Image (spheres, grey):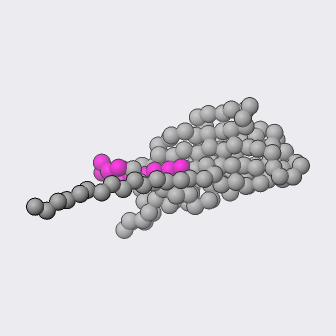
Amino acid sequence: MGRSEVGRINVTSVVEADIITVPYDADAVYRVMQAAYDSLGIPITGLDPAKKTIENSGVKIRNRLGKMPISTYLDCGNSQIGPNADSYDVYLNVSTKVTPGPAAGTARLATLLEAQARPATYNQAYSVCSTRGVLEQKLADVVKARLAK
């Protein structure tokens, strides 16, 4: 008799933080991080001033993050009607840790963006989305603009 074996595949996703150095002291940068998150429409679910971290942990969004289409920040694939991120339910985690930079008077923003999406109208499993790097850069740009005043 024939014999059949079923294989098993494990898929693991490794997501690394995007690190951007800004020309300001870490304490000053952390003081404006709440405003930076707010300006981009990222709801804040956690703050740890001792560790200089700010996060959004597990919010479900659809269509837009703040004033921007979600597809500006995430790649969740495409369908016949356009980027999936703009029509799917997206489960989003964003966290930023501020640390002293490599030179005096600089700071590093280590922003980790993780997202999964699924069709809003079908009961389907979530698929992993990838960052486009835009949100991380916009956070750094907002911080620089606020501290340049």
Residue at 84% of width from left, 45% of height from top?
Answer: 25
Q: Tell me which corner region of the image, top left, top right, bottom left or bottom right, holds residue 31.
A: top right
Horizontal side of 61 relative to 105 (left or right) equals left
Horizontal side of 21 relative to 38 (left or right) equals right
Residue at 51% of width from left, 40% of height from top?
Answer: 58
- Residue 38, above or below 69: above
Percent position (x, y) of residue 26? 80, 43
**Of all residues shown, which one is farthest toward the bottom?**
80
Asked if residue 135 can be seen in this view, the reply is: yes
Percent position (x, y) of residue 108? 76, 49
Residue 121 falls within the magenta-colored stretch:
yes
Residue 28 falls within the magenta-colored stretch:
no
Asked if residue 149 can be seen in this view, the reply is: no
- Residue 77, above or below 117: below
Horizontal side of 25 relative to 127 (left or right) equals right
Q: Nearer the viewer, residue 12 or 19?
A: 12
For the record, the magenta segment spans 114-125
Horizontal side of 28 relative to 97 (left or right) equals right
Percent position (x, y) of residue 76? 46, 59
Percent position (x, y) of residue 29? 78, 44
**Of all residues shown, which one is farthest toward the front?**
1
